[in-house]
Amino acid sequence: MVLQQYIQEILFRQHICCLPQLGVFKLTHTPARYDVTSKTILPPGEIITFEETLTNDGGLLDWISQKEHLVPAVAQLKMEKYLEDLRKTLKTSQRLEIPGVGVLHANAVGRISFEQEPPALTRDVLHVSPVIRQDVSHKVTVGTKEMVNKQVVDHLTASPSSSSSAAAPSSSPAAAPAAVTPTVTTTPATPTSAGNDYEYDGYAQEIPSRLRWLWVAIPVACVVAAGVVWYSVNKNRPQITRAESAVNPTPPPVEQVPAASPATEGSVAQSAVAATPQTLKYAVAFSVYKTRKAAEKMYHTRRAWKQPVEVVARPDSTFLISEIFNTPAADTTQMKDSISKKYKPTMDVIILINPEIIPF
């Protein structure tokens, strides 16, 4: 049956399995536990329970859709058919066996009950025996009162020899009464001294550290050391200044050379002018534009042609394309003829002394 396979796969993988409009299976793992009355250690196991609820987590619909490769609408119809067949089986008082899980059956009024299947692998129950420890006292709880008893159950000892050795002292007056079942705790009690205010006896008293003041003493020592160094340096500064002055004495005064007479200076200047020809900065203009934008456009064009031109502004708000020269005044005519041959002027070539160059 499809629902049986679904319960087997989902329950042991997700520990919960929902049958829509019927109920929910839950798988719970139980650890090993100790029974004080029978003095046995019960093995771990698994408990499967079933609760009748009307929940639907959508897991069955998705499982049928993936298992049978159906679209959700068709899978919904399939799921309703499977659930209806299960209800009819339970109403006819038939038992639905789920291998590895258990048996579902319904009573006369239609209430569904579940019986878990016994596990395939059984684990042995460990029988333990009480032992007597003369050198250790343990806390035990008898009802709501805490007492100290020397009889404990060693959970790690289950040999028959321990039971025979503990048969004689089992009737000692220190043992708990047979009518009351004590809850035994194997944690040794730690004796506390008088005047100890600690809440838990098992914790050792904290001893204050002798180095707890270092985090204050170290910064204070650093500040004091810095102050001593600063004081010693400032105290010895006058002596250092005197020592430096002794090593580096003041240089002797330099004798002043008498200034030359005006007549001598004039003769020297005249000789320099005669020796060096006077240079002149001027612009040789060969093209004129009425707007700055037009002049700027021609400037970038000629610059792209690798021509060393500049834009010069005139007082009449016109702009000239020119070349700038720094030559003796006698060479201006030669430079004007050179520009006439180099460019095709749109006007008569003119020379401007100390031109106003417009940067771009």
Image (spheres, rainbow, N blue to C red):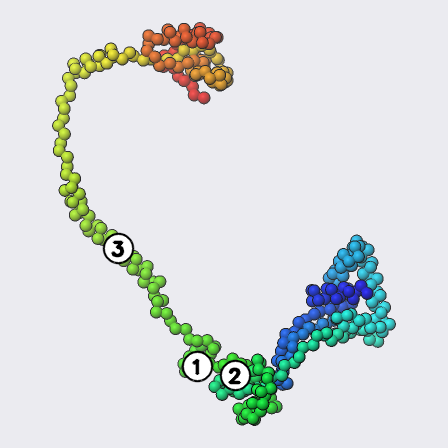
Residue 192: which disc? 1
How many numbered marks does the figure carry?
3
Asked whether the residues under the numbered discs 3 and 2 touch, taking CB atoms below 8 Å apart as contact, a structural biologist would say no
| Quarter residue 251 falls in | top left
Q: Farthest residue to the right: give it.
A: 92
What amino acid does circle 3 point to? Gly
**Residue 183 can be seen, yes or no:** no
Mark 3, Cα crowd under 10 Å, few <14 / some 14-19 / many 20+, is few
Where is the C terminus found, in terms of image quarters? top left
Please tell me whether mark 1 sits on a helix, a strand or a loop.
loop
User: Which callout, 1 or 2, points at the residue further toward the start of the chain?
Assistant: 2
176 or 100: nearer the viewer = 100
Residue at 82 percent across and 73 percent down: it is 95
Depth check, mark 1 against mark 3: the one in front is 1
Mark 3–mark 2 distance (CA, rounded to whole Å) = 63 Å
329 sits to left or right of 47 = left
Mark 1–mark 3 distance (CA, rounded to whole Å) = 51 Å
Please tell me whether mark 3 sits on a helix, a strand or a loop.
helix
Q: Position of residue 257 (x, y in %)?
A: 14, 24
Q: Position of residue 294 (x, y in %)?
A: 50, 16
Check disc 2 and report the residue beneath it: 139
Residue at 49 percent across and 88 percent down: it is 134
Residue 227: which disc? 3
What amino acid does circle 2 point to? Lys
